Image (spheres, grey):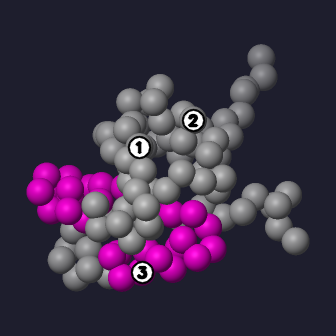
Amino acid sequence: MSKQRMSPSEALVETMAAEGVRTVFGIVGSAFMDALDLFPDAGIRFVSVAHEQAAAHAADGLARVTGQPQVCIAQNGPGVTNFVSAITAAYWAHSPVVAITPETGSMGIG
């Protein structure tokens, strides 16, 4: 009997669902498109925003209101730097925010 391997995106989404993540804030893009396709079946709602900083602020705001950890995801490259100010604000407010920053797949580097 052979074991079927999960893709990294499948492992990410399964872990988020197991931890009770119900909402993810971010910008639709190629860096995590395969994971985005898996969100609905896992019961995770994706809230699309216009800028990564807005995604991080939204996660921070929801975390402050609910007291529960919230998730935001950026596009690779400049999207990661767009998180910095909002994640810093969440950090100093002790908000439970998880920031996910994907990387280009090894086949796309170079």
**Which residue type does callout 2 highlight?**
Asp
- The residue that disc 1 covers is 46
Label 2 environment density (alpha carbons within 10 Å; few <14, some 14–19, many ≥20): some
In primary-sequence order, the first of circles 2 and 3 is 2
**Which residue type does callout 1 highlight?**
Phe
**Which residue type does callout 3 highlight?**
Val
In primary-sequence order, the first of circles 3 and 1 is 1
Q: Is residue 57 visible?
A: yes
Q: Is residue 100 visible?
A: no
Label 1 environment density (alpha carbons within 10 Å; few <14, some 14–19, many ≥20): many
Q: Which residues are magenta?
A: 59-87
Image coordinates for residue 45, horizontal then vertical, percent: 37, 38
Q: Which mark is residue 77?
A: none
Q: Which mark is residue 84?
A: 3
Q: Is residue 15 above or below residue 53?
A: above
Q: Is residue 6 above or below residue 61?
A: above
